[in-house]
Amino acid sequence: MYFAALLARTEDGWEASDTELDDVETLADLADLAREAATDDETVLVCIEQEGVWFGLVRVDGEDDPRVYVSDGAAAMRSSYGEVLLSDELLGREPEDLAALDQLVDLDGTEEGEPDREAAEEAPEGEAAEDTAPSGPLGDAQLLADLGLEAAELFSLTPQDALNEVAEALGATDVLESVR
């Protein structure tokens, strides 16, 4: 079971709205959705959780690039919503369009159609390297520091209580509970 909500900062505090992520395919789509909920380029926080397994936060401030934190990359990778958050940059790998270009122009030194032996050796058996993510937290653990939640506190949150703790730190407990 998933829960997703937008917390948008306003002059009067935080406003919450639940959101459907069915049409969201990329992090850019999610950032656009968040910007639509913003007033005057204020901060919007996208909160996503899979009950008891992992949670993710995406902070969007105006037109700045979104900042992402995921509590468990490996668990999120097994989720369609988690995959939206796990960008190539966050995972520390080459973007897909550059990898495709490498294959087209044969920059890796292999013959056309010949598999890259090193990449095949590094990937766990039965799994492509690009289909994995490290277990544990990924991303910008400082994304809420200026709002009262330091990285150490974010790391200590359990998936069961994380969004409630984040809302409490922001002073948005009541508004988040209203959309649960």
Image: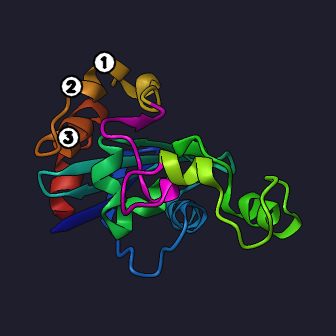
**Circle 2 SS class:** helix
Horizontal side of 98 relative to 126 (left or right) equals right
| Contact flag, marks 3 and 1 (Cβ < 8 Å) | no
Q: Quadrant of residue 77?
A: bottom left
Q: Quadrant of the N terminus?
A: bottom left
Q: Quadrant of the C terminus?
A: bottom left
- State the extent of the magenta-drawn residues as a range: 123-140
Q: Amino acid at mark 3?
A: Ala
Identify the mark at residue 156; answer none if there is no mark. 2
Q: Residue at x 49, y 45 (%)?
A: 122
**Circle 3 SS class:** helix
Separation of disc 1 and disc 2 at Cα? 6 Å
Q: Is residue 43 visible?
A: no
Pinpoint residue 62: horizontal percent, then vertical percent.
64, 49
Q: Amino acid at mark 2?
A: Ser
User: How many residues crowd mark 1 within 10 Å: few (<14), some (14–19), many (20+)?
Assistant: few
| Contact flag, marks 1 and 2 (Cβ < 8 Å) | yes
Separation of disc 3 and disc 1 at Cα? 13 Å
